[in-house]
Image (tube, rainbow, N blue to C red):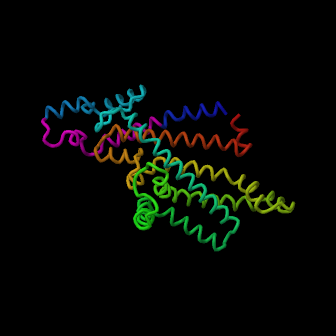
Amino acid sequence: MTKYILKRLLMLIPVMLGVIVIVFSLLYITPGDPIDSLLGDDATPEAVEQMREQLGLNGGYFQRLFSYIKNLLHGDLGICYATKQPVMDRLMQTFPNSLKLAGLAVFLSVIIGLTMGIISAVKQYSIFDNIAMALAMVGNAMPNFWQGLLLMLLFALHLHWLPATGFTTWKHMILPAATIGTSSAAAIARMTRSSMLEVIRSDYIVTARAKGQSELLITVRHALKNALIPVVTTIGMQFGHLLGGAVLTESIFAVPGVGKLMVDAIKARNYPVVQGGVLMIALGYSLVNLLVDILYAYIDPRIRSQYK
């Protein structure tokens, strides 16, 4: 297992290098100059040139790229143009909020998705099954922007049950977590239903019923346990997706997370913050996938034997 983990960690190096090159290249060819946002249109050419020199924007593509990679190797993500703080400090201030939001969203989506998927599989073609799958399709198809807007209008502005913006108490977390967790719950529900339907038709399930075991025991102990591999994969992918996909949701609900920080940075052409945010999200996504692979070994002994 240790050898496998080290191998996967080494594989992160080319992945992160590819992310660095792609993000840097996209920002390099993006129209607009961050100097215009910092100094305005009335800045003198001397002031512009001095600012470009200070920010390291006066070199060519390869010169700036190699300089950026060199700084990354020393743990330097650059300086935020707006606050003059190190980008790492800015990310560390906001990343815990994004992690809390993604964690709560995954918790809600797992509870809702597993419950809907299990019941839909056990009660296949029933009214509940049809309604649950229809809701899953709607939840997966509706963009997070409209989901968040509808939830805000209903629970914050109309019913006044929950606050619309902020992230100071647990009540502030419910609406944004529910917004981004809905589509994940839909994906988990569909995968759970599909995987459970394959398992409950297996011979050992028939044998368990013949021995007189209760349906609840058969569903939880036998069927669900053996149906978890694809479900865990989906949950892991959804967590990584939520970690980086909450950009618009954080902006809508004014959550001070990495997503909102990146949106503000894009508007201001604050490129070091954008690059640092993307790298942090990519690293988090990769580490979540690694944790999912390790979790496989504890769910299925056959997979555990392959890691030895």
Viewer-side residue, 201 vs 86: 86
Q: Dividing the image into 4 quarters, which one contains the N terminus?
A: top right
Does 210 sit above or below residue 4?
below
Query: Magenta includes 43?
Result: yes
Going 53% across and 48% down the picture, which residue do you hit?
A: 103
Question: Which x, y percent locates residue 28?
Answer: 31, 40
**Across the whole image, how many numbered discs are drawn on residues?**
0
Residue 70 lies in what quarter of the image? top left
Q: Which residues are magenta?
A: 16-44
Question: Which x, y percent locates residue 89?
Answer: 39, 34
Viewer-side residue, 260 vs 290: 260
Going 52% across and 47% down the picture, which residue do you hit?
A: 240
Going 74% across and 43% down the picture, which residue do you hit?
A: 301
Query: Magenta includes 153?
Result: no
Q: Left of 122 or right of it: where is 62?
A: left
Question: Which x, y percent locates residue 90?
Answer: 38, 37
Question: Which x, y percent locates residue 223?
Answer: 73, 57
Q: Magenta: predominant secondary structure element?
A: helix
